[in-house]
Image (cartoon, grey):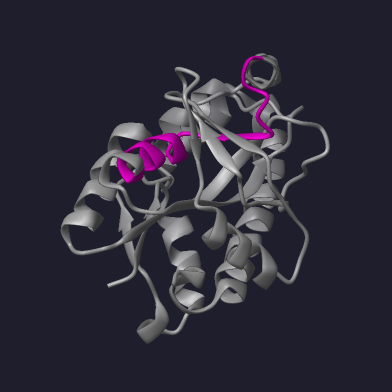
Amino acid sequence: MGPGVVTGLAREAACLDVVPEGERARVGCAGMGPRAAASAACDLLKSGCTGLVSFGVAGALVPDLRAGDLVIADAVVSASGEVLACDIPWRQRLGSRMSGRHTGGLLAGSDAPLFGAKDKRLLADASGACAVDMESHAVADIARRAGVPFVTIRAIVDPLERSIPAWVAGGIDAYGRPRLTRLIAGIAAHPGDLKTLLRLGREQACALKTLRRAALDAGAFLAFD
């Protein structure tokens, strides 16, 4: 049947629409976080998928990575420190098809959002990873248990030094869609954060553009053989 793609955000899933429908992998978008990602991965396997992809945005853990940079990780390190390798042939096929620069290395999994630069630096020191997200480690674990190949395709949204106001988490739903009333109330209560939010919006747009390009470059079923 081909691979299944797990995304946390609705906007991430929409990036795959650039692939012709007959060549598009099945997508499971269950919301942010490891539990939702694991559930989506299991559902995809039950539907007949024979490989798993974690697809979406990530936060940078090293200063070299900027918004819009692409990470096709060598392996994922879980919150407990377990290292789960990505499928080498599949990852190499993906890398060979990318029209732009991409980075390998370790991708860290976090069970909760990291809002501050300090927290990201601490995770970088503990894990040795170059980027972090909240879904890939869960998808990698499901793939390992099922004995199917796994890869990640992640675009950087927030650089290492970027701190995100913690109240913003209440202004979006589990799929990353804005809760306008809460966002407006948050901005009214924290007007000094507006500049940061506008910058984050630009960085997210840059990351999503990279994801669309990566999906298009990867081609049919995201280079799965």
Magenta segment includes 196: no
Which of the 4 quarters of the picture holds residue 95? Answer: bottom right
Q: In the rendered image of this protein, does residue 162 appear above or below residue 97?
A: above
The percent position of residue 128, horizontal first and vertical second, equals 68, 24
- Which of the pair 128/69 is nearer the observer? 128
Residue farthest along the right direction in this orientation: 64
- Which of the pair 188/100 is nearer the observer? 100
Q: How many marks?
A: 0
Magenta segment includes 127: yes
Is residue 2 shown left or right of residue 192?
Answer: left
The percent position of residue 79, horizontal first and vertical second, equals 47, 21
Q: What stretch is highlighted in magenta?
A: 126-143
Instruction: Give the residue drawn at x 59%, y 24%.
Output: 165
Residue farthest along the left direction in this orientation: 46
Q: In the rendered image of this protein, does residue 224 appear above or below residue 192?
A: below
- For the question of whether residue 173 can be seen, the reply is no
Q: In which quarter of the image is the N terminus?
A: bottom left
- For the question of whether residue 191 can be seen, the reply is yes
The percent position of residue 182, horizontal first and vertical second, equals 42, 33
Instruction: Give the residue drawn at x 45%, y 40%.
Output: 136
Q: In which quarter of the image is the C terminus?
A: bottom left
The percent position of residue 5, horizontal first and vertical second, equals 38, 58
